Amino acid sequence: MASFQHVHIPEGDLIKVENNQLVVGDNPIVGKLRGDGIGLDIFPVMEHVVDKAIQKAYGGKRQIVWCPIYCGLEGLQHYGEVLPAESIEAIQYLKVAIKGPFTTPIGEETHVCLSCAHQQMHEGTCDSCKRDDSVAPRFRSINVGLRQAMDLYACVRPVRYFEGVPAPNKYAENVNFVIFRENTEDVYAGHDFERGSQTAKAIIDLIAKETGRTIRADSGIGVKPISETGSKRLVRKALEWAVQNNLPSVTLVHKGNIMKFTEGSFAKWGYEVGSDEFASQTLSEKVLWDKFDGKMPEGKILIKDRIADSIFQQIQTRPAEYSILASPNLNGDYLSDAAIALVGGLGLGPGANIGETVALFEATHGTAPKYTGQDKVNPGSLILSAEMMLRHMGWPEAADLLLNGMRAAIKDGQVTYDLARLMRAEGRADVNELPSSGFGKAIVDRM
Ligand code: NAD
C-alpha cells in the first residue's frame, strides 16, 4: 500500500488494470471527492443509494470501500491548496473515483470563497458568508486541472429520457445516447493569442510567407490542433464502450467540410480505428450499403459520420438513429448541452472523464451556492454518474437497480424542487417535493 500524508487508504481491494482490463475485487477502494457547495449535500445521498444498490444486488458479498480525497475547500483545509499533488496521486493510485462540483473563479477578482463562491479583492474573511477559513487566491479550474494532470482525454456524457420529466422535444422518449468528447485538443488546448500580441503577429506573418494568404492585422489568433493520436484514442474508447455495452453505432461528428485537415482528419482517423482495430465488430455505412443493402448484420456496430451542424438537427428530429456520438472538443461541448436540453435539462445529466487507466466520474452541474447546506437540490446527476461508475467496475446488476429505482421515483413524482416545479407546471397534481435525502430514500424504496 502506498502511504500519503492526508489520504488514508482504508482496508479493501485496490482496483488494478491488467492487460487493459479493470480488475475489481469484492471490496474495491473508490476515491471520493465531495466537492464544494452543494457537493456536501448530494454526496452522502449518492453514497447511500449506491451502497444500498450494491447490498441488494449482491446480498452483502460486495461493498465499496470509500476513500476520502481532498480538493477545493477540503484541499485548502488539509493542504493549504485547492488542487494538491497528493490528491492527484491518490486518484491515480485508486484508478476509480467520483466527485462533486468544485468552485471555479470566473471574474477579475483576486480571491474567491470556496464555501459560497463569492469573489472579492482581498484575502481573509469572506465578505459574503463571513467565513474566515474558505477564501483562496484566484486559481485555474480544479476540474480542468484534474483532467489535465491525469490526461483524462475522454469526456463521456450519457443523455437519456426519464419518463415523467417534462421535455421540450417531441421525440424525447427516443433519446438515449452517449457523447464522447475529446478533452485535450482542439480549441480546448488554449492556444489563443490576443490581437497585436507577438505570437499573433508572428503567426499572421508566417501564414502570409508560407501561403500568400492574408489575415487582418487586428485579428486575435487561435490555433486548433487535432492529432491522429488524440483522435484515435478517443474513438477507440468510444468503440470499446459500444462493444462492452452492445450498442449499435458510433457516429463521428465533425466539421470536415470546412476544416479538412483537423475536423476532417478526425473522421478519417476514426474510420481507420474501426477498420484496423475493430474489423470483426464494425462496418462503415458505405460497406453497409455496398455489401448488405442497408440491412445491419446482427451484432455489428455501424460506424458513420455526420457534419456537426447537421447532427444538431438529427438529434432533434431522429434521435433514435444515434447511440454513441464521438467528437472533437468544441462540437462536443455544444452538443452535450444541446442534447441534455432535449430531455429536460442538466439536472439528470451524469458525466465521467476517462483516461488510459483512470476514470473520474462527476456531477455535471456546479456548486449552486445559494442552496448549499439546505438538503434541497437534485442529487440525480451525481447518482447517475455513480451508475456509470458501477458499470465501469463491471457491477451492472447494482447499476440497473439504481437506475430503475430512480426511474420509478421520477415516474411516481417523488422528486426534488427543480423537477417538482417543472412537473407541476405541466399540470401534474400528484407531485411530492422532497429534499435531496428524501429523493435518495425514494430511489432506494423503489429498487
Ligand atoms: P450551477 O450549476 O451551480 O447553477 C446553475 C443553476 O442550476 C442555479 O440556479 C442552481 O441553483 C441550479 N442547480 C445546479 N445544480 C443543481 C442541482 N443539482 N439541483 C437543482 N438545481 C441545481 O452553475 P453556476 O451558478 O454558474 O456556478 C456556481 C459555481 O459552480 C461556480 O463557481 C462555477 O464555476 C462552478 N461550476 C462547477 C462545475 C463543476 O465542478 N463541474 C460546473 C459548473 C459550474
Image (tube, rainbow, N blue to C red):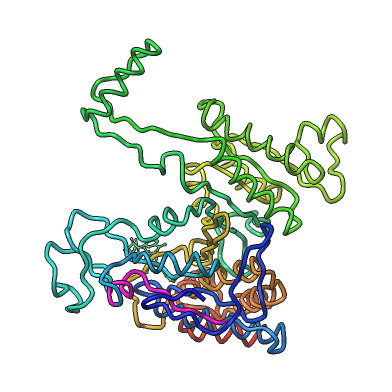
Q: Position of residue 193 (x, y in %)?
A: 28, 34
Q: Looking at the picture, does residue 369 appear above or below residue 179?
A: below
Q: Which residues are magenta?
A: 65-77
Quarter holding ligand 1: bottom left
Q: Position of residue 126 (x, y in %)?
A: 17, 73
- Tell me if 396 is positioned left or right of 388 in this view: right
Q: Residue at x 78, y 41 (%)?
A: 279
Q: Position of residue 198 (x, y in %)?
A: 22, 28
Q: Quadrant of residue 309?
A: top right
Location of the C terminus (image quadrant): bottom right
- Tell me if 113 is positioned left or right of 436 in this view: left
Q: Position of residue 357 (x, y in %)?
A: 57, 59
Residue 318 versus residue 373: which sits nearer the camera?
373
Residue 325 versus residue 20: which sits nearer the camera?
20
Q: Residue at x 22, y 59 (%)?
A: 138
Q: Residue at x 44, y 65 (%)?
A: 89
Residue 440 in view:
yes
Q: Residue at x 50, y 72 (%)?
A: 419
Residue 110 versus residue 14: which sits nearer the camera?
14
